[in-house]
Structures are given as structure tokens and as C-alpha cells.
Image (spheres, rainbow, N blue to C red):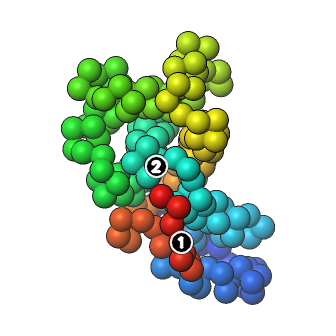
């Protein structure tokens, strides 16, 4: 059961209500609406995670599943397992992430390094220099920053879900419906 009541629709400004009316009903969006000043921005940031990254969709989903595992957010994991599969993350890789066996030699070197990097970012405020140097060899500077933003976004999203006991929701296809998405960068 959620720890907060649904927000009072009478205190939600008209522009926010209009923005949210284009989205499918979702308990997470409802919960985020308690912060009327940030809910639109939070959802727009989610949209950017799917439309404006140089980081490939498959890499993004590896990062998100890793964050879900290390932040202990079943909500994020449940939402992104089907998205990760659609982006090309096979069942074995998803199992390796969920078992935290991130040094597993069954993982391709790129995946292993990306997953280790994301896990370390969730676990610690600093990433060891040797790990960072290895990541610099496989990711552009833009992609490194994008990985950090994806980690931060989904850590935050996961904490809203776990701390407030947001009920699991249905996944709306292979990517979340976030309003008038017309272009995809990945």
C-alpha cells in the first residue's frame, strides 16, 4: 500500500493537469504529482532518456537494470525487463545482473565493464581510477555523462518507488509512453 495518499487534484495547476492528461494513468506519475513544480520536468527527463542520448538503447537498459538491482528497486526492474529484452539484452545477461555476478566471463567485455561502472556509481560516490580509465576506452565523454545521468535518474525514480511503496504498474510496450514523442535518437 502506498505511504502517501493520491495528491489532491484541486492543488495541481491547470498546466500540469493538462500535461499529465496526455499520459496513461500510472501510480508513479500520480505519486510524482505531489511535487507539482517538478513532475513535468521529471517526466521530460525520462523522455530525454529515450530520445536524446548518444548512448545506445541496449547500453541504457544494461545501466537501468544494474541500477534497479543495486538500488533494490523491483519497480524499476519490473518496468525495464521487457524494455531491456526489446533493446537486445538477452535473458542470460538479465539473470547475471540480477544475481550481481557482474564479473561473470559469460558477459561480453563491453557489457561487463558498463555494468561494473553502473554498479560502482550506485554503491559509492567515487569510481576507482582504473575502472574509470577502462570506461573511457569504451565510451565517449558524452556517453560517460549520459550513463551518470541515467544512473542518477533511475536511482531517484527507484527511491520514490521503494520509499513510498508505489505499486507496480503495467509496462506500456517496449518504451514508456511519455506524451508526444515523435523522434527517437537511438
User: Where is mark 1, residue-wise?
Assistant: 183
Nearest the eye: 6 or 49: 49
Please say if 49 is above or below 105.
below
Where is residue 62? Give x, y as percent. Answer: 40, 42
Q: Quadrant of the N terminus?
A: bottom left
User: Where is mark 2, residue-wise?
Assistant: 56
Residue lying at 27% horizontally and 37% vertically, measured from the top left = 93
Q: How many circles with numbers are drawn on the protein?
A: 2
Please say if 45 is above or below 147.
below
Residue 81 can be seen, yes or no = no
Nearest the eye: 134 or 95: 134
| SS category of the residue bearing label 1 | loop
Q: Quadrant of residue 39?
A: bottom right
Where is residue 182? Give x, y as percent. Answer: 53, 77
| Crowd around label 1: few <14 · some 14–19 · many ≥20 (10 Å) | few
Residue 86 can be seen, yes or no = yes
Tell me: 165 left or right of 62. Answer: right
Tell me: 132 left or right of 172. Answer: right
Residue lying at 36% horizontally and 65% vertically, measured from the top left = 174
Where is residue 7? Give x, y as percent. Answer: 65, 73
Residue lying at 35% horizontally and 25% vertically, measured from the top left = 109
Tell me: 145 left or right of 173. Answer: right
| Crowd around label 2: few <14 · some 14–19 · many ≥20 (10 Å) | few
Please say if 21 is above or below 152.
below
Where is residue 45? Give x, y as percent. Answer: 64, 60
Residue lying at 35% horizontally and 70% vertically, measured from the top left = 173
**Which disc, if any, is residue 88?**
none
Nearest the eye: 60 or 153: 60
Tell me: 90 left or right of 60. Answer: left
| SS category of the residue bearing label 2 | loop
Amino acid at each position: 500500500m502506498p505511504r502517501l495518499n493520491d495528491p489532491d487534484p484541486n492543488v495541481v495547476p491547470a498546466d500540469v493537469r493538462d500535461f499529465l492528461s496526455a499520459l496513461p494513468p500510472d501510480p508513479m506519475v500520480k505519486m510524482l504529482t505531489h511535487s507539482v513544480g517538478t513532475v513535468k520536468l521529471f517526466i521530460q527527463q525520462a523522455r530525454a532518456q529515450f530520445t536524446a542520448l548518444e548512448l545506445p538503447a541496449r547500453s541504457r537498459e544494461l545501466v537501468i537494470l544494474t541500477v534497479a538491482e543495486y538500488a533494490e528497486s523491483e519497480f524499476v526492474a519490473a518496468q525495464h525487463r521487457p524494455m531491456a529484452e526489446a533493446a537486445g539484452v538477452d535473458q542470460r545477461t538479465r539473470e547475471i545482473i540480477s544475481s550481481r555476478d557482474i564479473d561473470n566471463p559469460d558477459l561480453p567485455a563491453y557489457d561487463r565493464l558498463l555494468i561494473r561502472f553502473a554498479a560502482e556509481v550506485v554503491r559509492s560516490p567515487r569510481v576507482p581510477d582504473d575502472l574509470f580509465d577502462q570506461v573511457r576506452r569504451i565510451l565517449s565523454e558524452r556517453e560517460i555523462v549520459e550513463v551518470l545521468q541515467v544512473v542518477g535518474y533511475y536511482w531517484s525514480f527507484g527511491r520514490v518507488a521503494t520509499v513510498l511503496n508505489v505499486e507496480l504498474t503495467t509496462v506500456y510496450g517496449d518504451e514508456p509512453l511519455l506524451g508526444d514523442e515523435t523522434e527517437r535518437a537511438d
